[in-house]
Image: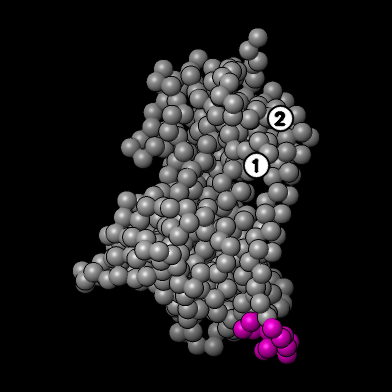
Amino acid sequence: MTEKFDVAVIGAGPAGYVCAIRAAQLGLKTVCVEKWQDAAGKPTLGGTCLNVGCIPSKALLDSSHRFHQAAHQFAEHGIALEKLGIDVAAMMKRKDKVVQKMSGGIKALFAANGVSLISGVARVLGNERIEITDAAGKVSEIHASNTVVATGSHPVEIPPVPLDDNLIVNSTGALEFDKVPGRLGVIGAGVIGLELGSVWARLGSQVVVLEALDNFLGMADRQIARVSEKIFRKQGLDIRLGCRVVSSGIEGQEVKVHYQDPQGKEVVEVFDKVIVAVGRAPSTANLFAPEAGVELDNRGFVAVDDRCRTAVPGLFAVGDAVRGPMLAHKGAEEGVMVAELIAGKAAEVNYDLVPSIIYTHPEVAWAGQTEEQAKEAGVSVKTGAFPFSAVGRAVAANESEGLVKIVADSDTDRVLGVHAVGSCAAELVQQGVVAMEFSASVEDLALTMFGHPTFGEALHEAALAVDERAIHMPNRKSAG
């Protein structure tokens, strides 16, 4: 007999597992179908984010940052070390332990909340039917009154640089190097490229980042992008903008990459490893039977409304499978929203305030409108920026690079965007998100007491700087 569920979630990444847990909390009989398996053939939960994305990359970023501090900054603190070295195998082992712990935590949450788990590849047939094929090829079927597609995304490949899973890899392969590459090429200067390039640069690689676009971090506020680019270049990342890769070839244990520079001249670079980090695409191929009636756009995204509902009643899609930024927290909030909508509750996601973060060191983060976006929308804006070089806590921690910037409406004083590059940038921007959710004004932030000494004082002084009231501003040009 075919088992029936109130909710079936396809995919156990951040959007899917959160949706499943919330649905179960609301009293709905819930199942989650996940195709990812470990070496032992057991379901691996957490999706790309936990297994080969957010969590393992942050583990390596943290390890590499500590090594870089020990090699280049400890002496300033009076700490002397001898024979400093990096054990890549041990670093990878720690990364894997972090992943295993987090994945196990999701399994425990499923058990605690009564979420059923099925291992296999799901296909939506329509009429509340879902076909599941297990690892052995056995096909079964379940029924669900509501289905939530949370199948995530996968790295984009480009014809000029085909992967070989050894010398030329995507973001997944870049998390599994067994030694530090001498010469590393990174194609793409987006979030993934900068993070992975930073990991290996800190450990000693000579890193060249090739970016086809002329602007660095085109999605970020221009002032923040300029300051960030200067910092990354200072750190040794060789960032080459306006460079279009045209071909590549493997010769022995080297990769030759041919690209056109901004003047149209063909250049050849030789690397020991190449990481292709040009973006991600939704994993929706073969997910829907024709009779399911689901619409995909030309890039493979599932068409949904602002509540993540498809045109098919009872069928939803969330996370990287739908429009919007491919971010774990965005997907998770959509998962919660959909679970609550299914349960008959009112729910929504504020897509205007999705935080974006690049976990380099220093971090780059932003939420809300950039100065350029606000002006393009016809809003009269005022801005304030404050450098970490004038923040006591940052100077004491030897983390004085970067700044915090606030964009506000000149007429209403309402905060429209908060942007930062520097240590703790993600946490400071999150404070800005809370403020903007409550429609805070610049005056609200200016009148709020911030502890001293903290990195948060940069946000406070940036608010004061909007109206030229910053107390500790050394000069008007120091904020970048």
344 lies left or right of 281? right
265 lies left or right of 191? left
Name the residue at 45% across, 25% down. 288
* Residue 466 in picture, x, y percent from top left: 50, 73
Q: Nearer the viewer, mark 1 or mark 2?
A: 1
Tell me if I can see residue 383 in this picture: no
Name the residue at 59% across, 38% down. 36
Amino acid beneath label 1: Ala
* Image quadrant assignment for residue 430: bottom right
Above/below status of 1 relative to 220: above
Residue that label 1 marks: 39
Which badge, 1 or 2, comes first in the chain's sequence?
Answer: 1
Quarter of the figure with the N terminus: top right
Residue that label 2 marks: 115
Residue 270 is one of the magenta-drawn residues? no
Disc number at residue 280?
none
Q: Nearer the viewer, residue 32 or 462?
A: 32
Please tell me whether mark 1 sits on a helix, a strand or a loop.
loop
Judge the density around disc 2: few (<14), some (14-19), many (≥20) Cα neighbours within 10 Å: many
Please tell me whether mark 2 sits on a helix, a strand or a loop.
loop
Name the residue at 71% across, 54% down. 97
Which residue range is magenta in the image? 70-83
* Image quadrant assignment for residue 135: top right
Q: How is the image coloured?
A: one colour
* Residue 454 in picture, x, y percent from top left: 69, 75
Q: Could you give the CA–CA distance between mark 1 and mark 2, rounded to whole angstroms?
A: 23 Å
